[in-house]
Amino acid sequence: MNDSLQLYNNELSIITKPIPKVNNPDDVLIRVAYSGICGTDLHIIAGEFPSSTKALTLGHEFSGVIEKVGSSVTTFKPGDRVVVNPNNNCNKCSWCRKGNPHFCTKGRNQTAIGVWKNGGWANYCRVPENLVYHLPHQIPFRNGIFIEPISCVLRGWNQIEFVSQQARILVIGAGIIGLLWSSFLHYKGFRKMNLSEISKDRGEIAKNMELGLEVFSPDQLLQQFEDGGDGFDLIIDCSGSPKAIEEAFNMTNSGATLLLFGVCPKESKININPFEVFIKELKIVGSLINPFTFEASISAVQAMERYLSYEKLGVDIFTLQDYTVALEKLKNGQVSKSVFKLDFNVE
């Protein structure tokens, strides 16, 4: 049986279809264990993020066990525990040849698993060998779903380049990405961390993580700053809200870095003062997916095990059949992340 949560014309439905065949020599067929719902998935469902216009199985954060392999696959065998990097590239265009595979138009717009090719919201998923990585036995399958988002966090961290351990930091948004950023920064030894979140439920999740976070609503944070509070040396926007970014820009200290990590609507605009960029020597940087960081993220997830409790992070598990509840709880802030469990024989 291969139940799949399929998207077509912005509508989701569960269908049962044949298990994918291993047609190509480099094919790897994976029996999916856990598969996460990402904020990008919500944008795709709403028609706000580019994806395949054909019937598509979403899901680009998943772990599982190899069921079958193609004739040329030598690195993996049936029974291996694995995770998947969903982002592929052509290896031929000028961007790929210059060492920037994340700018590869073909990779981003034709081959990403769960965005352009069928992904992990199904019992089985077929992917090419080059996107598959061994999942160490020390990492439970349920934590394998954190590897892809942490790989994106590592890319963002590389973009920041340097931050003093004494830096005053603001993370905007207490969705799972904001919480993972907060966890990663705490793991790195940073302690002067603040978090801004509009949802009271998500704010409570952040407080319960025991990271010593100062959690504020956007209005509270703005009022505190207007009353003479200190600015920030590093601001990481995980909200994708143009208004939040504008407000954050005004709270930067001299020499600060503003990382735009969340995905804003494609046509959105923000107003910033270029003189402030000049006089404060501000750095405004972006971060796109996860070039060259996926393997490192496997080690990071293993090292950060104590931070990745589903209970503390506000993550909840659902069956594929309960997708409407899973999506609703994620949208209204009752959970920071919804995760599908597809294989009930694994943890």
Image (tube, helix red, strand yellow):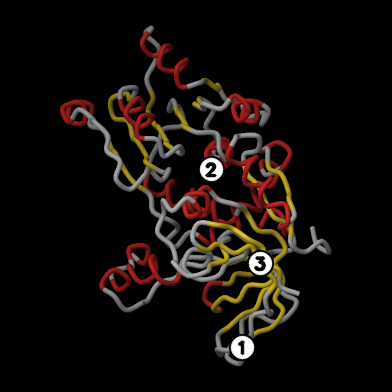
According to the picture, the residue beneath numbered tag 2 turns out to be: 177
Residue 259 occupies quadrant: top left
Q: Position of residue 94 (x, y in %)?
A: 25, 72
Residue 214 image label: none
Residue 328 occupies quadrant: top right
Quarter of the image where the C terminus is located: bottom right
Quarter of the image where the N terminus is located: bottom right
Q: What amino acid type should be assigned to the residue bearing mark 2?
A: Ile
Q: Judging from the image, what secondary structure is the residue with disc 1 in?
A: loop
Q: What amino acid type should be assigned to the residue bearing mark 1?
A: Gly
The answer to the question of whether label 2 and label 1 lie on touching residues, with beta carbons closer than 8 A, is no
Q: Position of residue 109 (x, y in %)?
A: 38, 67
According to the picture, the residue beneath numbered tag 3 turns out to be: 4
Residue 223 occupies quadrant: top left
Location of residue 240 with respect to 212 vertically, above or below: below
Q: Earlier in the sequence, mark 3 or mark 2?
A: 3
According to the picture, the residue beneath numbered tag 1 turns out to be: 70
Left or right: 138 in relation to 109: right
Decide: few, some or many residues near mark 3? Use Cα within 10 Å; few <14, some 14-19, many ≥20. Answer: many
